[in-house]
Amino acid sequence: MRRRRPRTKALHLLTLSLLQCIGVIPAPAQQLDQASLIQRIDAAAHARYDHVISYTVTEHYSVFRNNDETHPAAEMTVKTLYRRGVGKSYTVVSQSGSGILQKFVLSPLLDSEKNINMPGNVEKSWFTSANYEMKLKPGGMQQLDGRNCLAVSMTPRQKGPNMIDGTLWADPRDGSIVQIEGDASRSPSMFTKPPHVMRHYVNMNGFSMATHARALSGSALFGTTILTIDYQDYQVQLLPAK
């Protein structure tokens, strides 16, 4: 019996290699080349759209002034409903603080998110190679939030306030997004500079969902403004399995 074990192990390794070559099972993350990783990122974005029918989430917005992230100048909590093929709608649960910031920062932000997620628009904001020129960054595997990931530089093919010029970190096993960070390629307002944006994601039901976002911008009208968004209590409806 002992003499047969090396042959059995060799046969197992050969079978594993063949399955990886034909794509039945994914190859180890460290073997991924740039094209394969970007392909997985694209596939993850399309799979999320195809399989997530709807979701609700509670979003808490906080606006801070002049680098003070302890005392928010304005806050808003909204209940967000997303429906595939329809877009997003928002119900304001509570709001407090500066009426000016509510009117000129938070309300326009919600309007912008509605527009971005309308049918015909939503695909243009995806983090995919159709919208971005992507290149695998050197440095190999990194850990973010306890997840192994690879960093990819992304440059928008077209400029827009919702397009990020920066870095995307993806889980190489399935291409799901772990984090994005960079500068908006265009300012959302003539009164502000393009904000620096960071957004964290968690893998939920196999798909990336945002958990925290932060944007820093400067303007002559408001000075330095920091906006944070915390996402909680997701309720996700998926396409039923066939």
Image (cartoon, helix red, strand yellow):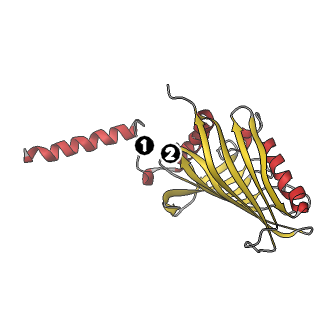
Q: Disc 1 vs disc 2: which is toward the camera?
A: 2
Q: Earlier in the sequence, mark 1 or mark 2?
A: 1
Q: Position of residue 162 (x, y in %)?
A: 77, 51
Q: Quadrant of residue 76?
A: bottom right
The answer, for residue 168, to whether it is visible in the render is no
* Amino acid type, label 1: Pro
**Callout 2 secondary element:** loop
Quick one: label 1, few (<14), some, or many (20+) residues within 10 Å? Answer: some
Provide residue 226's location: percent of width, then percent of height.
77, 66
Q: Residue 26's mark? A: 1
Q: Amino acid at mark 2?
A: Asp
Q: Is residue 196 something one can see in this rendering?
A: yes
Q: Quadrant of the N terminus?
A: top left
The foreground one among 231 and 161 is 231
Q: Position of residue 199 (x, y in %)?
A: 66, 57
Whole-percent x, y for residue 175 in the image: 54, 47
Tag 1 near tag 2, CB within 8 Å: yes
Figure disc tally: 2
